[in-house]
Image (spheres, rainbow, N blue to C red):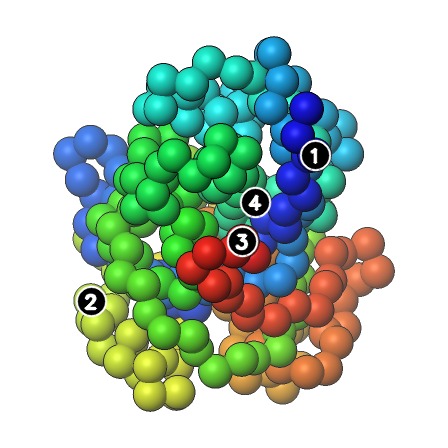
Amino acid sequence: MPTPLTLYSPAKINLFLRILRRRVDGYHELASLFQAIDLSDVLTLSLGPDDRLSCTDPFIPTDATNLVLKAADLFRRKTGMTFGLHAHIDKRIPIQAGLGGGSSNAATTLWGMNELCGRIASQDQLAAWSAEIGSDIPFFLTHGTAYCTGRGEVLRPLSKLGSKLLWIVKSPEGLSTPSIYGKLKANELLQRNPEEALEKFLKGNGEYYNDLEIPAFEIMPELHDLKKQLLNQNFEAVLMSGSGSAFFCIGDTQPVVPQHYFCKKASFVNRNACSWF
Ligand code: C5P
């Protein structure tokens, strides 16, 4: 039996997130600059006769609905392999936060299973397959910085951005992605050009915005109050990540928030082509 693989499974933030329109299939066409950060879960993976999943967080389902086991199933279907996966998640990324924790776990599983099987698939194949089980998963198979379009699965990998210190803040209440998209009125949004926002980031003077803040603040007005409180604390930027409810605050100084809130320092992270995060 080969030794288990222990891999970091990083979170992501969206430095800007523009929703362009609602599609006929119910998904939304978006344009967003995704960046991986070093706030990570830890996954332990090994091959076995059947599928088994455990997690340190008792609120996370460990049955076939978990993206880790969906990824294992996808890998088997695409490669014709038949073995099972034994996986354990040490959960450190808050859930219902817009930080992509579940998607990252799925991407890490695909990468890890491919390693355990002797790299039978290319990274491009893994990324293309992964879009079948979640829009944000292909991003986590890039090196960690990408401009994502389509429903999130069309990737333009970018060179590393200048590193920034940031803080992830999340109140105990989470938000569900489908409910945020369901509340969004895509045709009422400001018609900002995402390519211009991208240019600004590449030149080092980013324009941070997230169209999903509007429906998130409608559903949970206290999030808007939290953003205002954080904005008063002299950060370069304070923005909700993805569909929320976590915020990232760009700056060195620890934000002042109630003690029971999640509040952790993080920084941008990228990987090399042949190794994982
Ligand atoms: O692709 P994924 O399963 O992560 O998406 C979860 C839900 O988020 C979808 O069912 C849809 O309601 C919403 N979504 C969307 N447009 C996107 C991505 C997600 O409407 N581009």
Find numbered disc 3 in the image and state the secondary structure of the residue it sits on: loop
Find numbered disc 1 in the image and state the secondary structure of the residue it sits on: loop
Which numbered marker is on residue 101? 4
Residue bearing mark 2: 191
Residue bearing mark 1: 3
- Count neighbours of disc 1 (C-alpha within 10 A) and say few if under 14, some if 14 to 19, many if 20 or more: few
Residue bearing mark 3: 276
On screen, residue 276 versus residue 54, left or right, reads left
Q: Please report contact status of discs 4 and 1: CB closer than 8 Å, yes or no.
A: no
Q: Of callouts 4 and 1, which one flags the residue occurring earlier in the amino acid sequence?
A: 1
What percent of the width, then of the height, locates residue 86?
65, 23
What percent of the width, then of the height, locates residue 141?
41, 49
Q: Please report contact status of discs 4 and 3: CB closer than 8 Å, yes or no.
A: no
On screen, residue 164 versus residue 190, left or right, reads right
Q: Residue at x 77, y 34 (%)?
A: 56
Q: Residue at x 68, y 83 (%)?
A: 252
